[in-house]
Image: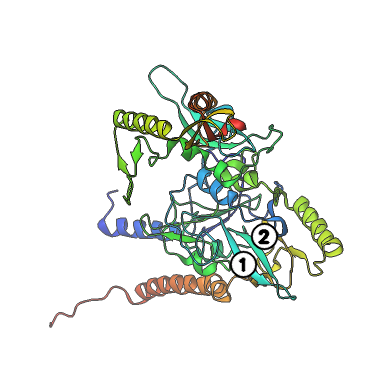
Amino acid sequence: MSSGNLRVQKISGHAGPVAGEGTQRQEQVCKLIDTTTCIGCKACEVACMEWNDLPFGETVFDNTYQTMPETRWNYWNLIKFNEHPREDGSMQWLMRKDQCMHCADPGCLAACPADNAIVQYQNGIVDFQQEYCIGCQYCVTGCPFNIPKFNPQTKKMFKCTLCTDRVSQGLEPACIKACPTGCLHFGTKDDMKELAGARAQQLREHSGYANAGVYDPVGVGGTSVIYVLHDITNPEAYGGLPSDPRVPWAVRIWKQPLKWLGNLAMIGGLIGVTMHYLRFGPKKVKDDE
Amino acid sequence: MTPTRRSFLKAGTGGAIVSLLGFDLRSAYAQSRDLKISRTTETRSTCPYCSVSCGVIIHTLGDKAKNVTAQVVHVEGDPDHPINRGTLCPKGSSLQQDIVNPRRLLKPQVRRPGSDHWEDISWEMAFDEIAHKVKKTRDDTFIETDDKGRTVNRCEGIAWNGGCTDTNEFNYLVVKTMRSLGVCYLENQARV
């Protein structure tokens, strides 16, 4: 196993400090998905399956062109097909490539109790380490995008890795490379934001999409996968993209104050038992029994 | 000094409590997957599917030593190819499966008239049947002259449709053979 040039930024469930936490020595990488030029050819889906050697499962016909209703543990990249009525009554395809968003503040990592099972690298990639995963599925609770999926055979969680193996060696992810229309781009977050902004401006000024904009939700600290949408005011129309994704407050409370309270209670209990022993000594069995 | 049972337990419990409070000797590094094409041979080729003819790179694992057989592990677009510049469509992206898929057909199959399923037949049987049918059909439908008396020498009872993954050499032979029979409904990938 090689870690290439990936440096760790955050580790799930880790006791003590993490080497590299809070530092930023690497450029944040980013996928840009321009939904306005996606033709729904699914080349990214196939390229993802092929590169990651994922076994193919049954597809589901759902009265749309979509391969299956949602991503699976062995299907990390899914084009969501949505028929959206325009104001004049005609139909418009809204096609969105659905995969892990690689949040800067990942809810899955916050919720995960297993040391090293979820890792965030300094270039922004959030990756699952299956050998450390305990299969508790808490990451599902933490994710606002419904991405982590459970494999019932191996009892491990899986999701898009943003092709860490390729990116760490200087290659673009498999989906990006395949895209024939050039609707997918890959580069640093700053470059992709600039490109996305220019494209959204072009759509607003020249293509009649007055609400075109860039989807980079602040609720999860920004994401390493950003979208250009025809209508930024209605992301739900794109197969349920949340308009303001946040890590659930229950996960926050559970993993921060409640965790420390629980730790305090445990240590306090130990100290109490020790003090009781020192003060009163061991329990003695009475002689008359 | 010999440790008593009591002092051993005390030291053990104390050590366990101290270690609970945060001494982690494991290094804090995750590991990512190896790049699966880091040791492959890259071979340039052309996607066989449609007439766009995208350039592909076929990644083969194995050093081609005498006692091993190299195997295709990955196919992706050729960035230096002027047509696709590294991109591929979904069919092209699945080219690896064109080579290694266990469900590839390896035997001739036939669906008899009125039947609802395909049955495996031997190559011998397939050759015989095809030869007989071609001979009979050609004898029945061959047209030497059209209604104005011009010599045409064509066989309208047979059509040939070539598969997209047929090789150039195979397609050359097909065209030669079919033209010599007088077949005019002839289509294959050799037009690419």
- Three-letter amino acid code of the residue under disc 1: Asn
- Three-letter amino acid code of the residue under disc 2: Thr
Res B29 visible: no
Is A288 above or below relative to A197?
A: below
Q: Position of residue B129 (x, y in %)?
A: 33, 33
Res B84 visible: yes
Question: Who is closer to the viewer here, A280 or B120?
Answer: B120
Name the residue: 56% across, 70% down: A256
Question: Who is closer to the viewer here, A77 or B156?
Answer: B156
Residue for badge 2: A223
Seen as rendered, the residue at the extreme front is: B148
Task: Name the quadrant of the C terminus of chain B.
Answer: top right
Name the residue: 38% across, 58% down: A155
Distance CA(mark 2)–CA(mark 1): 23 Å
Q: How is the image coloured?
A: rainbow
- Specify the label residue A82 is tagged with: 1
User: Label 2 marks which chain's residue?
Assistant: A
Q: Position of residue B171 (x, y in %)?
A: 52, 28
Is B45 above or below relative to A146?
A: above
Seen as rendered, the residue at the extreme top is: B66
Q: Secondary structure at mark 2?
A: loop
Q: Position of residue A131 (x, y in %)?
A: 43, 50
